[in-house]
């Protein structure tokens, strides 16, 4: 049974989500303010965190920032105000894996939850280490080395790099990357993948341009001399 932490001060919404996710077979823990949410998130005992932006005490952005300073292994789905693109980008830049705008349909939330919890071991997926363009991906340990330095990646960033390395220099479309890393097709005007790529580039000490943007098509890795 996957364990989910919901940090949201909307009691009505929290109760509704508790019923929906429990019915889906998940164990849900609630936190109604930022400080309580952060303390529970840092316990490291959750498979997924659902995080609202507007919270009493520390807000969702502060909570996420502090969480990512200590833990990058737990996927985070941010719940943002509809139409507030700045909030969505800010959350992704701080290390959120995906976002969902309020109000949302319960079925859409369940679909996002299932997508982010798909990271259980899959024996049909290649598990040995793979290397290309200075990157070495170890799927069993969820680690990526870049020029022999371990990159501190979120789960989504790891899946993006793994997919690009598997491409071995071929162009990987945005839709392919979104399905591989987020478990969903990329919606029109959705900037989430671009923000994740930007975050990865910032973490590469040398030659971040080895992740090349192919305008209108996607991304690929370049072998640099």
Image: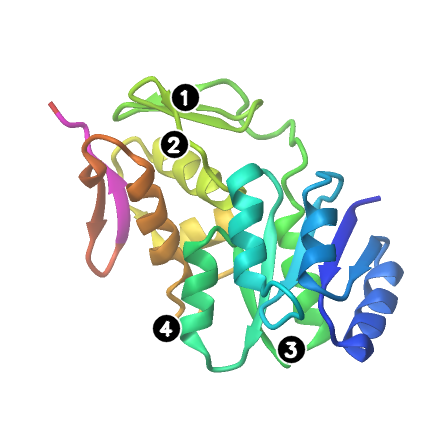
From the top left corner, tell me how far across and down residue 126 is, in percent. Answer: 53, 25
Report which residue position mark 1 lands on: 130
Residue at numbered disc 2: 166
Q: Quadrant of the N terminus?
A: top right
Mark 2 vs 1: CB contact within 8 A? yes
State the SS at label 4: loop
- Frontmost residue, 55 versus 30: 55
Neighbours of disc 1 within 10 Å: few (<14), some (14-19), many (20+)? some
Q: Earlier in the sequence, mark 3 or mark 4?
A: 3
Q: Quadrant of residue 130?
A: top left
Which residue carries the number 4 mark? 189
Quadrant for the C terminus, please: top left
Task: Single out the mark in the foreground, 3 or 2.
Answer: 3
Could you classify mark 4 by the number of other residues whose Cα lies within 10 Å: few (under 14), some (14-19), or many (20 or more)? few
Badge 3 element: loop
Mark 4, mark 2: which one is toward the viewer? 4
Label 1 – label 3 distance at C-alpha: 38 Å
In the rendering, at what x and y percent does residue 214 appear?
Answer: 20, 52
Q: Nearer the viewer, mark 1 or mark 3?
A: 3
Of the numbered discs 1 and 3, the one sitting upstream in the chain is 3
Circle nearer the N terminus (2, 1): 1
Q: Is residue 135 left or right of residue 81?
A: left
Image position, residue 26 (x, y; %): 83, 53
Mark 2 and mark 3 in contact (Cβ < 8 Å)? Answer: no
Residue 55 sits inside the magenta stretch: no
**Residue drawn at point x = 42 percent, y = 75 percent:** 85
Crowding at label 3, few (<14), some or many (≥20) Cα neighbours within 10 Å? few
219 falls in the magenta region = yes
Residue drawn at the location 68% of the way across and 42% of the way down: 42
Whether residue 6 is situated above or below residue 162 in the rendered picture:
below
| Residue sitting at x 37%, y 65% | 191
């Amino acid at each position: 049974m996957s364990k989910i932490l919901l940090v949201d001060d909307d009691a009505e919404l929290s109760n509704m989500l508790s019923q929906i996710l429990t019915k889906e077979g998940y164990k849900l823990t609630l936190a109604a303010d930022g400080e309580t949410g952060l303390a529970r998130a840092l316990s490291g005992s959750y498979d997924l965190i659902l995080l609202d932006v507007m919270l009493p005490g520390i807000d969702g952005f502060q909570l996420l920032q502090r969480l990512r300073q200590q833990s990058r292994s737990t996927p985070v789905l941010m719940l943002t105000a509809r139409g507030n693109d700045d909030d969505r980008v800010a959350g992704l830049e701080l290390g959120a894996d995906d976002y969902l705008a309020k109000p949302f349909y319960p079925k859409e939330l369940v679909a996002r939850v299932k997508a982010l919890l798909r990271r259980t071991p899959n024996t049909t997926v290649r598990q040995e280490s793979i290397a290309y363009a200075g990157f070495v991906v170890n799927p069993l340990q969820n680690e990526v080395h870049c020029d022999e330095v371990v990159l501190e990646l979120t789960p989504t960033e790891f899946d993006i790099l793994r997919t690009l390395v598997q491409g071995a220099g071929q162009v990987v479309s945005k839709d392919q990357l979104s399905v591989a890393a987020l478990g969903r097709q990329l919606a029109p005007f959705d900037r989430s993948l671009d923000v994740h790529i930007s975050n990865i580039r910032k973490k590469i000490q040398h030659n971040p341009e080895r992740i090349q943007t192919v305008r209108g098509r996607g991304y690929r890795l370049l072998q640099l001399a």
